[in-house]
Amino acid sequence: MYCKQKESNMSTKLSVQTLHTDFLILGGGTAGCAAALSFCRADTAHSVLIVEKAHIKRSGCLAAGVNALNAYIAPGRTPQDYVDYAQQDAEGIARADLLLTMAEGLNAATARLEALGLTILKNADGSFATRGARNLKINGENIKPLLAAAVEKEPRVTVKNHVNVLDYIMHENRILGAIALDVRERVLYILWAKAVLCATGGAAGLYRPNHPGFSRHKMWYPPFNTGAGYAMGIRAGAEMTTLEMRFIALRCRDTIAPTGTLAQGVGARQVNALGENYEAKYGITTSGRVHGTVTENRAGRGPCVLKTVGITPEQDVDLQRAYLNMAPSQTLKWLESGQTPSVRNVEIAGTEPYIVGGHTASGYWVSTDRETTIRGLFAAGDVAGGCPQKYVTGALVEGEIAAAAALKYMDDPPPTIALDVTEKQRTLEAYLRQQSEESTDALEAEMQGIMDEYAGGIQTSYRFSAESLATAAEKIHALTLRAKNLAATSMQELVYICELQERLVLCRSLIAHLNARQETRWHSFAERTDYPEKSAAWECFVNSKLVDGKVQIILRDLVEAGVRYEH
């Protein structure tokens, strides 16, 4: 029997500290940094506070670097072309207004990155070296430190690292700030602000990963992105959208390294064990590529690979260098085995599902200005819904759009209320005080197993039904009750408990969304065995809101380009 033991010198009391700022940014990743820099360019009088769970220099999805900017309007292309591409990939379930305003700012955001010192590869004539119709080649290992350094140079920006945000402070649907927990010190923060930006990223760790157990954090998306922003919004009654459009990445098997560099960089095609190119059979949308690989494997025509045998020696070396910038384990695997991509094709597989609005349309339901349904609360980057295919530069643009819109609240201060955090403080201190026969790791693994088996994970080839989702909902509810009895022996362990609870909140809403859309519009991403076909009746947004403790589903019409959407 497991029993969490207390450290004798571990105090269970949390001190409370209060901080005031004008513009509060939750998360110091791509969108958060861009918002802070943009806000300071436009405003010279107001303060900015960024709270970051890790350290801003190496936090968020850019922590380890990237080797390409995947959203750029190349010569001969227009922002509308990008809108058309993203809508087609999303099978029509994407906000054209959000896509267009994002696409119109991509190249300016790219120029600002280059001005910060990012190396964008150039052709002999000085033009950017493109990779396909929308991508730029970069040397991007240092992209996050460059953004962080620029933020830290701003005199009106304060960065508090190692602070984990727990809940919003609200009054009559107006954001007033947030409550946060120090990751290292026994401190509970009350953060007051005139406007707040949620830029906490997407959600990993909901489903059992490709490598469970000791290596469970070896995954495509950052394992420390727990869906905190989604969970806070759900609990606060914010409207969420399209959570059912999960993202499943097609990756190099074993290393979970990206495949786009192979497909676009050297034109590697998806091939089954019979040597057949199966891309045309299933389509080349993001979900179609995953679905094709899953289906070929299930039919006994695997393993599936990206065909790289036959590329030139120069291309082989370029690929090894490219992966050192973003997934060194893949290059190491090639070198250690002596079987580089020109010698052996690269086996591919899908990851576990994620909720990530930078690739799909899942997240907060926002206005064109990226304001959520809670007044004064904005969302940008992976946590904002409706606008897929953002990637790095799109997240930058969304942060800038949100910052510009937040300026209107600088002269419209929120109401002053008396806030009592005693109950929150006691709840958190109880975890530090009590003992438990269960561990957070064990409950996290159990949650992932439930979602994997009953809510469309790897085990079921991403397929699910209303019956299996009902079972998932029942088991997640029971697990949520058990999580209240966990114990922590340190502040970091207390944060782990909060992260598990955030994931459980999101799982509940995700299950409701998966059940609500009664069709299969995106194979693998949302593969229903009881509704296997796409239906015109579901050409709408599936939204949700927590009302009186229950997830209420809301269906909303599509929003076209040129329309300025307000709540």
Image (cartoon, rainbow, N blue to C red):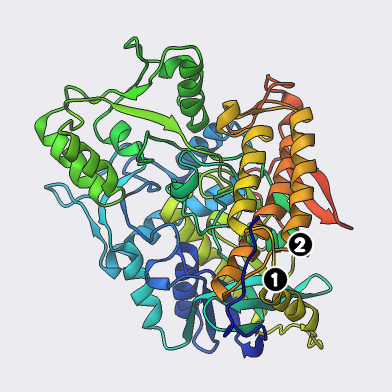
How many C-alpha atoms fall within 10 Å of the one at disc 2: few (<14), some, or many (≥20)? some
Whole-percent x and y of residue 553?
A: 81, 44
Q: Earlier in the sequence, mark 1 or mark 2?
A: 1
How many C-alpha atoms fall within 10 Å of the one at disc 1: few (<14), some, or many (≥20)? some
Front one among 49 and 390: 49
Q: Amino acid at mark 2?
A: Arg
Q: Which residue has dot 1 on it?
A: 167
Q: Which residue has dot 2 on it?
A: 235
Camera sees residue 230: no
Q: Choose top left, top right, bottom left or bottom right for residue 187.
A: bottom right
Asked if the residues shown at circle 1 and circle 2 are in contact, with their CB atoms under 8 angstroms apart, the answer is yes
Whole-percent x and y of residue 262?
A: 29, 34
Q: Secondary structure at mark 2?
A: helix
User: Where is 397 relative to 42, above or below?
Assistant: above
Which residue corresponds to the image point at 49% horizontal and 23% vertical from the top-left?
294
Front one among 405 and 193: 193
Q: Horizontal placement of 116 versus 212: left or right?
A: left
Farthest residue toward the right?
548
Quadrant housing the N terminus: bottom right
Q: Amino acid at mark 1?
A: Asp
Disc marking residue 425 = none
How much space separates mark 1 and mark 2, taking CA atoms? 8 Å
